Image (spheres, helix red, strand yellow):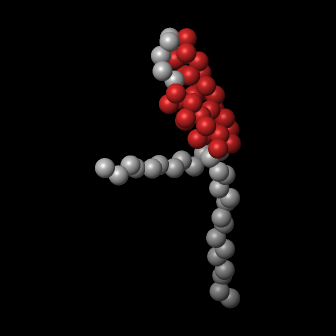
Amino acid sequence: MKETNYSLIITDLEKRILIQGLTLLKNKQINENKKYDFIDDLIIKACDAPAIQNKKKHFYEER
């Protein structure tokens, strides 16, 4: 079965909040002696996600 990929458009602040939340979840999993490898993978993906430049389309008026 084909895997579905998703992309989110978030601001820098939202990215930092997401990473902080994942880190807190990871620490909670460690304290409860549960697996946390998948959370590490998500943190790495979030940190390494490329920034998208704002592409502004130019609309020219006819005169």
Q: Measuring 50% from the left and 30% from the top, which residue is drawn there?
A: 38
Question: Is 50 positioned to the left or the right of 8 in the image?
Answer: right
Residue located 67% across and 60% down the image = 54
Q: Position of residue 8 (x, y in %)?
A: 54, 47
Residue 28 pos. (x, y %) = 55, 16
Instruction: Name the residue: 57% across, 30% down.
Output: 40
Query: Which one is in front, 57 or 40?
Result: 40
Coordinates of residue 11 in the picture (x, y in percent):
65, 44
Q: Pinpoint residue 34: horizontal percent, then vertical percent.
A: 47, 16
Is 2 rendered above or below residue 47?
Answer: below
Q: Residue 55 versus residue 28: which sits nearer the camera?
A: 28
Farthest residue toward the left? 1
Q: Residue furthest bottom?
A: 63
> Is residue 19 visible in this depiction of the protein?
yes
Q: Quadrant of residue 55?
A: bottom right
* Residue 59 vertical placement versus 36 (above, below): below
56 or 22: nearer the viewer: 22
Q: How many numbered discs, if any?
A: 0
Q: Residue at x 65, y 40 (%)?
A: 47
Q: Is residue 18 visible?
A: no
